[in-house]
Image (tube, rainbow, N blue to C red):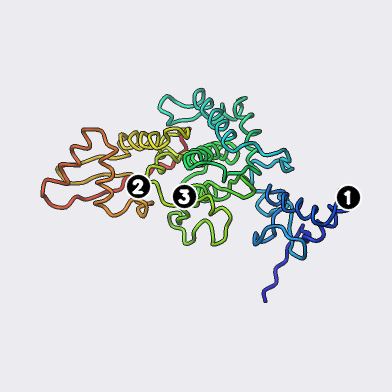
Amino acid sequence: MKMKFVKNCFSGGELVEALIHHLDCGRRKAVEIGKKLARKHFIHHVFGENEFEDGNHFYRFLEHEAFIPKCHNFRGAVNDCEPKAAAAVSQRLACIMSAILETYASDDRSHLDYVGISNSEEFRRYVILVEDLQRINLLSLSYDEKLAFFLNLHNAMAIHAVIRVGDPGGMIDRRFFFAEFMYVVGGYPYSLSSIKNGILRSNQRAPYSLVKPFSSGDKRLELAFGKVNQPIHFGVWNASRGSPSIRFFTPQGIESQLRNAAREYFQRDDGMKVDLAKRIVYLPRMIKWYKSDFGQDKEILKWIINYLDASKAGLLTHLLGDGGSSVNIVYQNYDWSLNS
């Protein structure tokens, strides 16, 4: 048997005894209180293996979880207020971040003034707001609400990460940026990578990674989407110049908003180009990284037609249907420089 050592923990029985003593209640009532504390993420089983039980299972307070020091929406103590409704917090987050874009983003949302954002009243309110995410109940969200929430959270966290960590650098350096900058949300840690690959991409491996974000039994799997919705790739923003432009979404009409984001991206020269003479289609490297989400080459090209303007769609349709030699795909270089 492999032995594991854990710190800052207590047994279920010890908590029950403490509750009986301090609240002057019976054992059954104390156990119910313990279960409520666990459901509301004040305490967790040390290995996440079970709900609260009276006995020898061990638990710890949320603030003693090993991931907490990495969570940038935790400032010394758990927010012990009754959690606000997830939909209301999500809406407030989107409103604050949209106001930030209104003032501190370029007209095409391709550049941000990070210094201005960091000193703004809106960002101060955002930093306070995200503390409300610590014990929020995300299972109450509808599909569209959940999709908008995680897209918006990812993009807002990326802004926060640049302000706190600085320029994340190139692709290799950004691994820390994507994986180590975290929030505690609904009692569990979320990085930029776990939001994109674990939640939005249905727990698929990140490019060049050997493991999935969430292992079997991870509570966060309850929130992962059942299948990949390809346009989400154009709603996720990563603070680089090669990224789709930053935006924040509303649950109402979110599929239409994502389609518009994809169309906007493919309008760019680094998004998609066609060379009829050479029978080459130039695509964003992002599609190569996430090819498992888009399918084989022919499937990719047919899918893209739906997101092109009339000119580009006409060129691509001609290439695919003229009976000539095969169409070659070239993936363009990606600009990892900061979009400041």
Can you identify the residue that label 2 sits on?
285
Can you identify the residue that label 3 sits on?
225
Q: Nearer the viewer, residue 44 or 98?
A: 44
Q: Check residue 262 in the rendering and tell me which mark sits there, or answer none.
A: none
Marks 3, 1: nearer the viewer? 1
Q: Residue furthest bottom?
A: 1
Task: Tell me the SS state at disc 1.
Answer: loop
Marks 1, 2: nearer the viewer? 1
Label 1 close to label 2 by CB (< 8 Å): no
Mark closest to the chain's N terminus, 2 or 3: 3
The amino acid on which the numbered mark 2 sits, given as a three-letter code, is: Arg
Q: Check residue 24 in the rendering and tell me which mark sits there, or answer none.
A: 1
Marks 2, 3: nearer the viewer? 3
The amino acid on which the numbered mark 1 sits, given as a three-letter code, is: Asp
Residue 189: give x, y in percent of width and height: 61, 49
Q: Residue furthest top?
A: 103
Task: Tell me the SS state at disc 2.
Answer: helix
Answer with left or right where residue 100 lies relative to residue 279.
right
How far apart are the two marked residues, 2 and 3, measured between alpha carbons? 24 Å
How far apart are the two marked residues, 3 and 1, measured between alpha carbons? 44 Å
Q: Quadrant of the N terminus?
A: bottom right
Name which quarter of the figure residue 277 lies in. top left
Residue 68: give x, y in percent of width and height: 67, 49
Answer with left or right where residue 200 lies relative to residue 55.
left
Residue 240: give x, y in percent of width and height: 45, 39
87 vs 28: above or below:
above
Residue 50: give x, y in percent of width and height: 66, 61
How far apart are the two marked residues, 1 and 2, measured between alpha carbons? 63 Å
